[in-house]
Image: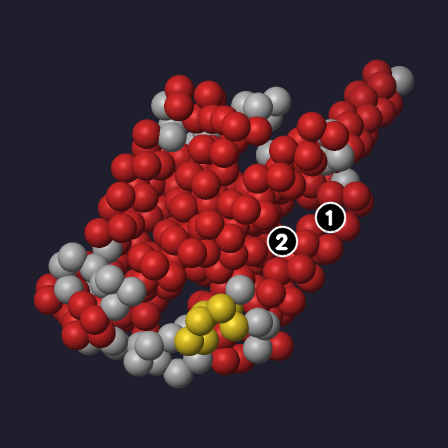
Amino acid sequence: MFESLRTTKGIALIAVFAAFHTILSSLPYSITIGVSGSITLGVISAPLLGILLGPITGGIAVLIGAIIGMFINPAGAIFGFASFLPATLGALSAGLTIKKQGYISAAIIGLFILVFYLHPYAADAMYYPFLHVIAIIVALIFSTRVAFWSTEVSNIKKLGLGIPIAAFVGTLTDHMVGGSLAIWILEIPAPFWNSVILIYPIERIVAVIITSAIALPLYYSLKRSGIFDFIKQETDRKNAIQKNFGKR
């Protein structure tokens, strides 16, 4: 899982996709309601990179890109320095889900739902995280044999289920982390959360559809071509050299 951090090619891959996320993080996706600033296209690139690169490589790329993007586009950094958290955990969650570890993604979402509910304002906005609870259920189901069936690289039709599920879980993780930060850092009262309870699902589902439409053909093509296998191959080669050197 950490192979990309042990090779120069892996580090270069992280750098390239971090730049990709930085660029998208500077472009608005939608305007935040009741809060100054905007939601950026990073809401799409974060789960996309988690799916394509995996939880660690994708998560690190998004982390670096998000931090750089915060300085390039301060309007998108509505939570101050903590603004890197939603996208980074969204990428991690999407990557874990596609790697058949959706139970970890479910735990992340559940943790931040709890953080949200711990705020006094949440008592009057109890139903706000309904879609995130659905995401937890989906992530847990995807930790079963369903995940193995729907992530079969050789079958794009099966991936047509697995990729959108990973995108959905990653996107809702990003959103729940952002919601938890918003209620605590920005002190947004209950009327706001209740006013967007039927709006945010549309916004996020559209993001999931866009992410899936991009990720599905890319994931299928890249995995089939083995283009990312060079990271593991280079790591194995280095390990073999070190092992042989140690025997001398």
Q: Is residue 217 left or right of residue 32?
A: right
Q: Position of residue 90 (x, y in %)?
A: 46, 52
Whether residue 199 is visible here, answered yes or no, is yes
Q: Is residue 49 left or right of residue 165?
A: right
Residue beneath label 1, please?
Answer: 13
Q: Residue at x 62, y 53 (%)?
A: 61
Q: Position of residue 165 (x, y in %)?
A: 42, 39
Who is closer to the viewer here, 145 or 61? 145
Element type where label 2 sits in the image: helix
Mark 1 or 2, nearer chain start? 1
* Residue type marked 1: Leu
Crowd tier of the residue under label 2, counting other residues whose Cα lies within 10 Å: few below 14, some 14–19, many 20 or above: many
Residue beneath label 2, please?
Answer: 61
Give the spatial CA distance, label 1 vs label 2.
8 Å
Q: Position of residue 116 (x, y in %)?
A: 24, 60
Q: Is residue 224 left or right of residue 80?
A: right
Q: Is residue 225 left or right of residue 47?
A: right
Who is closer to the viewer here, 166 or 85? 166
Element type where label 1 sits in the image: helix
Whether residue 92 is visible here, answered yes or no, is no
